[in-house]
Image (cartoon, rainbow, N blue to C red):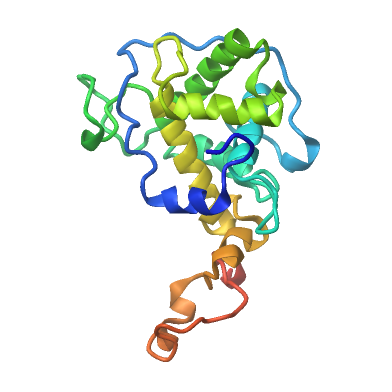
Amino acid sequence: MTDETIPRRKFLLGAGLAGTAVATGLSEAAPAAAQAPAAVAPAAAQAEPLLALNETEFAFVVAAVDTLIPADELSPSGSECGVAVFIDHQLASAWGGGAKMYRSGPFAKGKPEQGYQLALTPGEFLIAGIGAANAWSRQAYGHDFDRLDANKRVEALKAMEAGKAEFADFSSRAFFARLLEMTMQGFFADPIYGGNRNKAGWKMIGFPGLPATYANLFEEYRDKPYVVEPQSIADFS
């Protein structure tokens, strides 16, 4: 992360590394995070009802994804690409509720390579992390994260990424890793899941969409660019 914005290409290079620290640092019985005063998310970023997040939490996510993916010559901002909506929908899904997770304990502190080791569902984890992040932001900067100027947001995210942001009973490093992971997923997932609006992520990297639609062209275009309008699941429904 730079002092002004996070370079887009550096963001893409990190796609395979996100999420490795999710299992570290959270106390076994973390209390519910304090809620920040209500904040209103930008109207353009919230085009449909929220499913998991409240307005304060959604405002944090909008600010975070727009800091990670600022609007530039490569694409619109993260929230304009639907990344914040994608995150809200995922937290409200069966995955967000931990439907396929083992949740009977014990929940001993694990090493990063051991994967997720917490009693919280993925949805509970991110929402509690948002509360902890806003509480830390108010202590460090006097405002919730979404109320900070662009440079302070970058500074705050860098502190979380490095584990230097002191969250109460919570690992800021683990929270940032999950937030970054979900941001990248929302930017590159099929648009049917709410993110990658107008296939902006796919168009930026030249991904043509569903592999089945061009499987017969693999040999013909091996090591050559294949320029075509990307196809999503919704295009075939």
What residue is at 57 percent from the left and 27 percent from the top? 155
Is residue 235 among what the camera can see?
Answer: yes
Q: Position of residue 94 (x, y in %)?
A: 44, 39
Q: Position of residue 179 (x, y in %)?
A: 49, 35
What residue is at 70 percent from the left and 48 percent from the top? 80
Q: Is residue 84 left or right of residue 104?
A: right
Q: Which residue is farthest bottom?
A: 220
What residue is at 37 percent from the left and 33 percent from the top? 98
What residue is at 32 percent from the left and 20 percent from the top? 25
Q: Is residue 119 left or right of residue 188?
A: left
Q: Is residue 63 left or right of residue 28?
A: right
Is residue 35 among what the camera can see?
Answer: no
The number of callouts visible is 0
Q: Quadrant of residue 95?
A: top left
The answer to whether 47 is drawn above or below residue 146 in the figure is: below
Q: Position of residue 46 (x, y in %)?
A: 72, 39
User: Foreground residue, 116 or 184?
Assistant: 184
Q: Which residue is farthest right?
A: 43
The answer to whether 41 is drawn above or below residue 83 in the figure is: above
- The quarter of the rendered structure image containing the C terminus is bottom right
The answer to whether 57 is drawn above or below residue 78 in the figure is: above
Q: Position of residue 185 (x, y in %)?
A: 49, 49
